[in-house]
Image: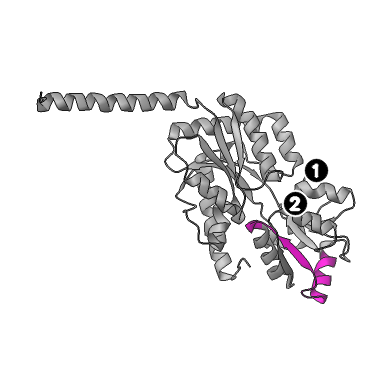
Amino acid sequence: MKLARRTFLQLAGAAAATLASSGSTRAEDYPVRPITMIVPYPAGGPTDVLARVLAEQMRGSLGQPMIIENIAGAEGSIGVTRAVRAKADGYTIELGAMSTHVLNAAFYTLPYDVLNDFAPILPLVTTPQVLFAGNTIPADNLKELIAWLRANPTTASVGIGAATAHLIAALFQRETGTQLTKVPYRTANIAMQDLVAGQIDLVFTTPDRLALVQSGGAKALAVTSDMRLAPWPDVPTFLENGLPALSFSPWFALYAPAGTPRDVINKLNEAAVEALADPTARSRLVQLGMEIFPREQQTPEALGSLQKADAERWWPLIKAANIRRE
């Protein structure tokens, strides 16, 4: 039996309304199953620790487990590719970084658009980089190191892992008029092991390795933060050593695939904000040398603006200075 055109349109409209209503209900009920947080770096590093601290706190707010999935490789781009191809329903999110969501786009041809293929959730923390030197280096402070490097060009080697470390090493050479032999590493952990063993001379990496200094395994000569780190006040900044170009702190943030519903983004944001406010979580992150973004900056809009501003700052500089990944 054929339906009259008016009856057909009425039924079609009712079906569409039902689908829209059910979609809205699902968004209101989110989440109803575990959420995967992709970490595009190996387990055990500071990014992984940040993810696990965050996931444990967010689990309580969301009422669902947060499953950490470490997908390392290609400077983080393999894990980011996995995240961008996930369904935009809030059940796959990614812990991104300035390396993965800004710098990699200047160094590589990527299968995604870092500025448009992701939905920002919020910026989490900044993590400065520390210049570590092996005990075989005949310098106890930054000025002595620079003088020695100038007198001995290409003698010292620097372990390079993520794009951030590569950028800082390139800026360091440019600003100090020195030449370093770059040695690529898959992770900063392995680079630090070789530094302590005397296989390489310098490493730029995160402050959580400063325990090696306390044990006598390495020397910390400078940090890229604007101010000295509270847990390690004896480590001077590059800024106070007259190198303002090396004064910046890379950041970490949460992203979802583009197209994730805004109300889902809001729920994830609220859970992460609550996690960052937890005293135990805050204490743990500070001990790792991480600085939590102020509450007023913990928004999707702030993250989007931060990422765009860093792209506008670093992409032309990297191109103009001809900084390349070996």
Q: Secondary structure at mark 2?
A: helix
Report which residue position mark 1 lands on: 231
Which comes sooner in the sequence, label 2 or label 1? 2
Percent across and percent down for residue 182 are 71, 67
- Picture coordinates of residue 225 (x, y %)? 71, 52
Reply yes or no: does residue 156 show up in magenta. yes
* Quadrant of res 172: bottom right
Relative horizontal placement of residue 288, taking residue 84 as reference (left or right): right
Examine the structure image and report whether residue 312 is included in the region drawn in magenta: no
Quick one: 137 or 161, which is closer to the camera? 161
Query: Above or below — where is 183 with respect to 250?
Result: below
Q: Quadrant of residue 259?
A: top left
Q: Which residue is the site of mark 2? A: 189
Which segment did they paint magenta?
143-164
Q: Is residue 19 visible?
A: yes
User: Within 10 angstroms of label 2, few (less than 14), some, or many (20 or more) residues?
Assistant: some
Q: Looking at the figure, which quarter contains the N terminus?
A: top left
Q: Amino acid at mark 1?
A: Pro
Q: Between tags 2 and 1, which lies in front?
A: 2
Residue 169: assigned label? none
Query: At numbered mark 1, what does the secondary structure look like: helix, strand or loop?
Result: loop
Left or right: residue 272 versus residue 46 is left
